[in-house]
Amino acid sequence: MNDSRPIGVFDSGLGGLTVARELFRLMPNERIIYLGDTARVPYGGRSEETIRQYGLQDARVLMGMDIKLLIAACNTVSSVALDYLTRHIKEAPVIGVVQPGAKAAVLRTAERKVGVVGTRATIASSSYAKAIQAIDPDIKVYGKACPLFVPLVEEGFFRHDITRLTAQHYLYELMDLGIDCLVLGCTHYPLLMGVIQETVGTRIQLLDSALWTAKEAQDILTRFEALAPAGVDGLQESKFLVTDLTPHFETLARMLLGQNLPKIEKINLEELTEEIQK
């Protein structure tokens, strides 16, 4: 049994494309409808009420497109508003990126000391610490907010000297605590993987929440016998929507997903705010 309906993925900007990339790698037949709220990026410095509002607006737009699974590919929304989304979205399973990343950390840490980097909202919520310690309460979790990482990614400064200095500023403190795993608790951060790994060294393993979220999605679709039929070029049949389209965003999206990426479409913010009022 198959289900040819698309997977819905949303994020505040382009970071969620790292989840889309892993979904296509694991399940190349799956179609994705991606929504990047680029006009309001980043979400990490917003109030919890605003994050919940934005997340539900994003979700409602995708649910109106008959998706079979909804992925909140934004760690900030996953940390602050996932329960809120699941209470309001009943038409399809809803998953975030925190729980898959937490499970990976528990499996991979040997020293039982895990670091987590994310936006201010993600770290303030202690979502990763709660998820990890719910599985193993003896694991120590150290969080560090890295608010400059998202704008550096959005600017395409993946290996810039400014990025290296910023990584050193944020990460040396975690290294001194003796962590052996570092969860990249924001889907933008895998795009800085090279600089982050150079900064922390090879002794510390980086855990990409995007990869583990894609695996979680694959497990859910397999369990419900809802995988797409074979023979479909998922990427070519997918749709990419943003609330503000710039040439810079399109360049980065094609770098991530390939030059054969379908045309990126712009939707108006009014379409998101109207959805919440229906």
Image (cartoon, rainbow, N blue to C red):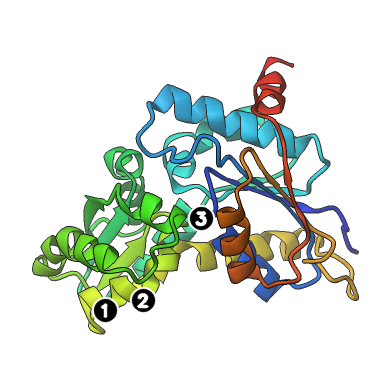
- Examine the rendering and report whether any part of residue 160 can be seen: yes
- The mark nearer the N terminus, 3 or 2, is 3
Residue topped by disc 2: 194
Q: Could you say whether the residue bearing mark 1 is in a helix, strand or loop?
A: helix
Kind of residue at badge 1 = Glu
Q: Nearer the viewer, residue 68 or 28?
A: 28
Quadrant for the N terminus in the image: bottom right
Left or right of 175? Residue 77 is right
- Examine the rendering and report whether any part of residue 90 can be seen: no
Q: Residue 8 in the image: state x and y as whole percent.
A: 71, 48
Q: Could you say whether the residue bearing mark 2 is in a helix, strand or loop?
A: helix
Q: Is residue 13 above or below residue 31?
A: above
Looking at the rendered structure, which numbered label has been put on residue 198? Answer: 1
Kind of residue at badge 2 = Gly
Instruction: Name the residue located 26 percent from the left edge and 84 percent from the top edge.
Output: 202
Q: Residue 27 in the image: state x and y as whole percent.
A: 73, 71
Q: Residues within 10 Å of mark 2 (few under 14, many from 20)?
A: few
- The mark nearer the N terminus, 3 or 1, is 3
Circles 1 and 2, Cβ within 8 Å, touching? The answer is yes
Instruction: Name the residue located 74 percent from the left edge and 65 percent from the top edge.
Output: 261
Instruction: Name the residue located 52 percent from the left edge and 38 percent from the top edge.
Output: 82
Kind of residue at badge 3 = Gly
Q: Residue furthest top?
A: 277
Quadrant for the C terminus in the image: top right
Q: Residues within 10 Å of mark 1 (few under 14, many from 20)?
A: few
Label total for image: 3
Q: Is residue 97 above or below residue 64?
A: below
Residue topped by disc 3: 15
